[in-house]
Amino acid sequence: MEMVVSCPECDENLIIPVDAEEEEIIDCENCGVEIEIVSLDPLEIRIFEEEEK
Ligand SMILES: [Zn+2]
């Protein structure tokens, strides 16, 4: 079953693919932000930020 979350940036609906895995990164097609899947059950996401070097 597909899961839908709201983009933290723009509130666009993002579809989490059925075969998504934890730590996978998905892109918001609306604003381009990268979202990391922190946990699948329960579903938890956060904005993915590359660590500063
Ligand atoms: Zn967005």
Image (tube, rainbow, N blue to C red):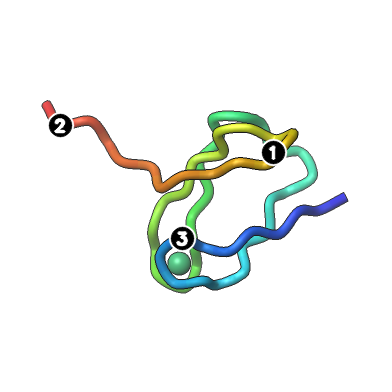
Q: Find residue 37 and report its horizontal and vertical position in percent.
A: 56, 39
For ligand 1, the image quadrant comes to: bottom left
Mark 3 burial class by Cα count in 10 Å: few <14, some 14-19, many 20+:
some
Q: Secondary structure at mark 2?
A: loop
Residue type for callout 2: Glu
Nearest to the observer: residue 27 or residue 42: 42
> Vertical placement of 29 versus 53: above or below?
below
Label 2 sits on residue: 52
* C-alpha span from label 3 to label 2: 21 Å
> Which quadrant of the view contains residue 21?
top right
The numbered mark, 3 or 2, whose residue comes first in the sequence reads 3
- Badge 2: residue crowd in 10 Å (few <14, some 14–19, many ≥20): few
Residue located 39% across and 63% down the image: 32
Image side of residue 19 versus residue 33, left or right: right
Tell me the kind of residue under disc 3: Pro
Label 3's element? loop
Amino acid bearing label 1? Ala
The residue labelled by disc 1 is 20
- Residue placed under numbered mark 3 in the picture: 8
Of circles 3 and 2, the one toward us is 3
